[in-house]
């Protein structure tokens, strides 16, 4: 006959197993999903659905869901001194959220300083940014995903990149903003997912150039260094995001960059190793942190019959590709991401082309619509091919 203490130990062990089995099943399911090539989020980085006209917001969202996407990332720019949103912007974001909800689409909001001159570097500016972030969070409580800043490793969005002695300083100042944003958002709602990074895929790390940029490799290393030296005992982000663009639109997504500081889709192992070196052994997840490819685009050649919808001239460095090649690159990007264990999703930039050839991006799956005739088909040849690729991956018909 067992003693009471033995019975108690057996009961405790049985309870422990009951608690552990569901967790192990979840982990196994996640591993299996990546073994079969399945992502959680398939989406676009698209501001077109953020429109004060409900009908326009609905039309743009329909293009998103018709293609098989289930997630939209939209930006909310901030300037120093800004405390709230004007009436038009409020209506635009509210329309985006409501229309997305009606389509069963997840919304990610990227709150970022509006270009370099307005970067919140000193504490007072950063707290102003955080207060604005709280305002957006409270006025749109439906949104649970917030990305903090946009490409802070580029001087176009974050200045300065370097200190007076030529060393990287952007990672340190971004670390402070990200930590403050994380703490405020988690105090409002612990279920909010805070997305950090949003890094450009490449940079020069040269303080002597006119266009100052930091590579994602160096930025991650310096971000980890800033975190460790701060003595912080809380995380600074739930997910890490990066924009794995190629050097130009002709570069396939499975191009490796083993001898450079660039990070693309195929450099996943390098990215995970960098995150591990930066954060493993701290309160911040490193090699296991979920990764979101929150912006990727391939520009297409505009056909002669559609060129009237655009203005300006394409830059020679862009090297656009055919619509069929765009579809093949998007399909390959999805396949690569789906087989990478810690990647949660891919967002393409955009669903619809921007009309300016020299300033905008023609990476959508639909042509620009500003000058389109009523009833004119704007669907690119790549759209049905990408839709088919998403459906195949979602069904688990692909194995890694």
Image (cartoon, rainbow, N blue to C red):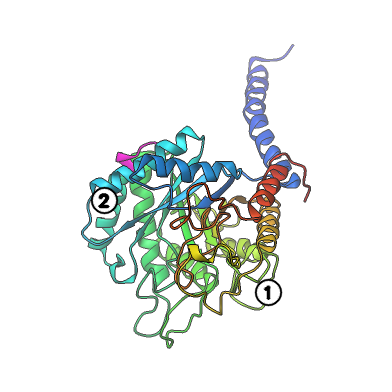
- Tell me the residue at 30%/48% (across/down): 89
Q: Position of residue 206 (x, y in %)?
A: 47, 84
Tell me which corner region of the image, top left, top right, bottom left or bottom right, holds residue 27. top right
Q: CA distance from mark 1 to mark 2?
A: 41 Å
Q: What is the secondary structure assignment of the residue under circle 2? A: helix
Q: Position of residue 354 (x, y in %)?
A: 47, 61
Residue carrying label 1: 258
Q: Nearer the viewer, residue 129 or 63?
A: 63
- Tell me the residue at 67%/17% (across/down): 7
Can residue 34 be seen? yes
Q: Residue furthest bottom?
A: 208
- Tell me the residue at 33%/62% (across/down): 113
* Residues in magenta, as a range: 137-142
Q: Position of residue 73 (x, y in %)?
A: 47, 50
Residue carrying label 2: 131
310 lies left or right of 270: left
367 lies left or right of 208: right
Is 129 above or below relative to 8? below
Is 168 above or below relative to 274? below
User: Which quarter of the image is occupied by the N terminus?
Assistant: top right
Q: Position of residue 315 (x, y in %)?
A: 52, 77
Q: What is the secondary structure assignment of the residue under circle 1? A: loop
């Amino acid at each position: 006959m067992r003693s009471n203490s033995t019975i108690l130990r057996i009961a405790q062990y049985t309870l422990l197993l009951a608690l552990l089995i569901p967790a192990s099943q979840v982990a196994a399911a996640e591993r299996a999903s990546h073994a079969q090539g399945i992502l959680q989020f398939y989406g676009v980085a698209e501001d077109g659905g953020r429109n004060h006209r409900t009908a326009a917001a609905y039309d743009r969202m329909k293009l998103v869901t018709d293609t098989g996407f289930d997630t939209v990332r939209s930006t909310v720019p901030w300037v120093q001194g800004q405390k709230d949103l004007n009436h038009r912007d409020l209506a635009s974001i509210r329309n985006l959220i409501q229309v997305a909800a009606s389509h069963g689409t997840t919304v990610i909001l990227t709150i970022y300083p509006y270009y370099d001159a307005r970067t919140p570097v000193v504490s007072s500016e950063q707290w102003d940014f955080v207060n604005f972030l709280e305002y957006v969070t409270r006025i749109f409580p439906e949104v649970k995903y917030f990305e903090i800043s946009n490409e802070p490793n580029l001087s176009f969005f974050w200045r300065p990149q370097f200190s007076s002695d030529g060393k990287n300083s952007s990672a340190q100042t971004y670390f402070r903003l990200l930590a403050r944003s994380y703490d405020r958002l988690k105090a409002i709602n612990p279920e909010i997912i805070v997305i950090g990074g949003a890094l450009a895929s490449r940079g020069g790390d040269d303080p002597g150039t006119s266009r100052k940029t930091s590579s994602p490799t160096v930025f991650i290393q310096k971000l980890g260094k800033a975190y460790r030296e701060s003595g912080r005992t809380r995380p600074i982000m739930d997910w890490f995001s990066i924009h794995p663009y190629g050097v130009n639109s002709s570069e396939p997504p499975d191009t490796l960059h083993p001898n450079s500081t660039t990070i693309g889709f195929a450099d996943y192992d390098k990215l995970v190793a960098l995150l591990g070196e930066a954060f493993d052994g701290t309160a911040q997840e490193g090699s296991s942190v979920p990764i979101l490819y929150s912006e990727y685009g391939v520009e297409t050649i505009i056909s002669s019959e559609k060129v009237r919808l655009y203005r300006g001239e394409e830059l020679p460095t862009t090297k656009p590709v055919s619509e069929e090649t765009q579809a093949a690159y998007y399909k390959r990007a999805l396949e690569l991401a789906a087989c990478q264990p810690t990647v949660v999703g891919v967002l393409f930039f955009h669903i619809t082309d921007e009309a300016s050839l020299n300033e905008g991006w023609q990476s959508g799956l639909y042509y620009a619509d500003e000058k389109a005739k009523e009833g004119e088909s704007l669907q690119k040849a790549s759209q049905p091919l990408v839709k088919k690729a998403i459906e195949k991956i979602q069904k688990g018909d692909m194995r890694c």
